[in-house]
């Protein structure tokens, strides 16, 4: 059967992608950011996942105001990069896993979560920067990736509780897939940041540290935190953090944190990154 062996969370700051793509990772500003992923790159080479269910948010590249799916699962065989800002990143095409994608859709929809099945879409920095941070710059991505897009851009985003419960439904779905696969679930975006309005530039280290602690020790309680607390404490784009709860719900409650990294500044965003290994 397929097994969820580990979970990864990481921020997706677009300037990190530009630093990688333009060869600036050794610059003084960027060195401490990339240092936080040295462990992770070695770790994932040993882990060799077959598939990553990658929870991320699109930034008006694949979707726009015409259609706003709350939860969308990519069931295509491949997904080409596209992007705002610096434009499409020069990274490999993402290869999907339609059989597992459709299986997850079937199981999770029958468990009362309404997913939108997407058979054609591009993927932006929300998905490709986490891949670059973990895998570097390979000619091809070393595993399949199922993109799982969450709307955290247009109000109303889903609650943390709904995301956490969805993660549990995803865990059940993957565990019932009849193929021997090493699957990781990633939750991306965050941490505290606000890109607009009078509070643009907001960073809240105390909130972020508390979030990391509670994600590990008190995920049930953290899931109950209302939207307004994310926005007030972590800024308008801090709401991206609800996606981390999908990853957490997909792992066992006693999953072990094997790596934690937190760094400010990176562009306008506090960078957070953790790795959990699942107990058997
Ligand atoms: C920045 C962060 C984001 O999450 C994003 O989607 C765009 C920009 C930033 O820090 O500049
Ligand atoms: Fe973002």
Image (cartoon, rainbow, N blue to C red):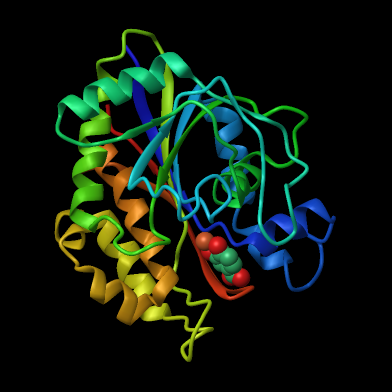
Residue at (34, 42) in percent of width and height: 71
The total of numbered circles placed on residues is: 0
For this rendering, which residue is in front, 236 or 116?
Answer: 116
Residue 155, picture quadrant = bottom left
Residue 51: % across, % down: 48, 25
Look at the image and tell me in which quarter the N terminus lies. top left
Residue at (53, 76) in percent of width and height: 195
Residue at (60, 42) in percent of width and height: 131
Q: Is residue 211 above or below residue 131?
A: below
For this rendering, which residue is in front, 156 or 134?
Answer: 156
Residue at (30, 25) in percent of width and height: 105
Look at the image and tell me in which quarter the C terminus lies. top left
Taking the image in four quarters, ligand 1 sits in the one at: bottom right
Q: Is residue 22 above or below residue 146?
A: below
Residue 38: % across, % down: 64, 50
Q: Is residue 277 above or below residue 261?
A: above
Residue 264: % across, % down: 56, 75
Residue at the extreme bottom of the image, as rendered? 198
Q: Is residue 98 in view from this perspective?
A: yes
Q: Is residue 121 above or below residue 17?
A: above
Q: Is residue 172 in view from this perspective?
A: no
Residue 120: % across, % down: 54, 29
Residue 159, picture quadrant = bottom left
């Amino acid at each position: 059967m397929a097994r969820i062996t580990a979970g990864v969370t990481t921020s997706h700051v677009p300037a990190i992608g530009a630093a990688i793509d333009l060869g600036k990772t050794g610059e003084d500003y960027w060195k401490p950011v990339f240092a936080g992923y040295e462990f992770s790159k070695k770790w994932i080479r040993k882990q060799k996942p077959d598939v990553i269910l990658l929870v991320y948010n699109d930034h008006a590249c694949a979707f726009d105001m015409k259609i706003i799916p709350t939860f969308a699962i990519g069931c295509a065989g491949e997904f080409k990069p596209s992007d705002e800002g610096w434009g499409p990143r020069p990274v490999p095409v993402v290869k999907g896993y339609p059989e597992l994608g459709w299986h997850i859709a079937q199981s999770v929809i029958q468990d009362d979560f309404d997913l939108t099945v997407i058979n054609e879409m591009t993927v932006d920095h929300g998905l490709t920067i986490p891949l670059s941070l973990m895998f570097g710059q390979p000619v091809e991505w070393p595993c399949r990736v199922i993109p799982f897009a969450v709307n955290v851009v247009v109000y109303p985003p889903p609650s943390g509780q709904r995301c956490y419960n969805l993660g549990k439904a995803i865990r059940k779905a993957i565990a019932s897939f009849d193929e021997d696969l090493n699957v990781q679930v990633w939750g991306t975006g965050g941490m505290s940041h606000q890109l607009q309005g009078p509070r643009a530039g907001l960073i809240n280290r105390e909130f972020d540290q508390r979030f990391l602690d509670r994600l590990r020790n008190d995920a049930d309680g953290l899931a109950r935190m209302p939207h307004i607390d994310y926005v007030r404490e972590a800024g308008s784009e801090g709401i991206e953090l609800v996606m981390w709860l999908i990853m957490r719900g997909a792992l066992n409650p006693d999953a072990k944190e094997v790596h934690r990294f937190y760094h400010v500044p990176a562009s306008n965003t506090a960078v957070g990154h953790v790795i959990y290994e699942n107990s058997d």
